[in-house]
Image (cartoon, grey):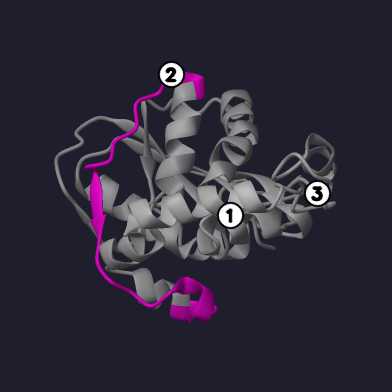
Amino acid sequence: MALLRGLARLALDALFPVSCLGCGCEGELLCPSCLQAAPRAAPPRCPVCWQRWTGDGSCRQCVRQRPSYEAVRSAFAYQGAVREAVHALKFRGISALAPILAAPMARLLAAWAPPVEALVPVPLPWLRERYRGYDQALLLAREVGHSLGLPVLTDAVRRTWTRPQASLAGDARRQNVGSAFRPRRRLDGLRLALVDDVATTGATLDACARALRQAGAAGVWAITLAREG
């Protein structure tokens, strides 16, 4: 099924010229100008969850309930051309976007420089991955890992079936993924960076980081392409 979808995408590419998701110009899926112009997820933000925050120290949510990860950073705000690119990667099968979107993630992780030794993509439920044909977080993690010389652990954690997070809001997101992740092996003493496409409430990253810590990880950070809010 995945092979057939890949062949279908190649056929469509041959029939219809590639055009930028941001400006529509032909030749690239996301042109450098649109990527450069995309709004960054810049401070002021909470230094832990990276949501907008103008107060001192961590935001109220992180003070009230500290996440299982040390901190998360995101390259862009989840809007405009970046939002369109994420939707195309996740829902339209345009996996060729992964290297384009992973490049700014790699630059951000290198500049941030948390003391990580390996990357862990936030896994999809297997049925959703099978239907989609790939796991977008894994594609992004492989590109980031290749750029920075970091290994990608694909056997660190597994995910049970949950409702799509996009259909939920607020506390319902935390309840939905609260017990969705399980360790698959011991990770004693490893310092890891989770990789995902978008951080919204941080509930998925928190639940996945909790599973990694249960497996013995010494520290967990997170990097995403975009941040909503």
Is residue 82 shown above or below 204?
above
- Per the image, the residue denoted by label 3 is 39
- Of residues 41 and 154, the one nearer the viewer is 154
| Towards the viewer: 9 or 125 | 9
Residue 139 lies in quadrant: top left
- Tell me which residue sits at (42%, 34%) in the image: 142
Question: Helix, strand, or loop for circle 2?
Answer: loop
Which three-letter amino acid code belongs to the residue tagged 1? Leu
Quickly name the residue at label 2.
149
Q: How far apart are marks 3 and 2 (CA)?
A: 28 Å
Let me know if residue 123 appears in the view: no
Quadrant of residue 185 within the rendered picture: top left
Label 3 is placed on what type of residue?
Pro
Say which residue label 1 marks: 12
- C-alpha gap between disc 1 and disc 3: 31 Å
- State which quadrant residue 2 falls in: bottom left
Quadrant placement of the C terminus: bottom right
- Residue 173 as seen in the image, left or right of residue 151: right
Residue span colored magenta: 147-172
Does dot 1 land on a helix, a strand or a loop? Answer: helix
Residue 160, magenta (yes or no): yes
CA gap between label 2 and label 1 equals 34 Å
Q: Earlier in the sequence, mark 1 or mark 3?
A: 1
Q: In this view, does 15 lie to the left or right of 163?
A: right
- Work out whether mark 2 precedes mark 1 in sequence or the reverse, and give the earlier one: 1
* Residue 24 image point, x, y percent: 82, 52
Q: Where is residue 114 in the image (x, y as percent from the top left)?
A: 50, 28
Q: Is residue 32 visible?
A: yes
For residue 197, side relative to residue 4 (left or right): right
In the rendered image, the vertical position of residue 58 relative to residue 107, given as above or below: below
Prevailing SS of the magenta stretch: loop
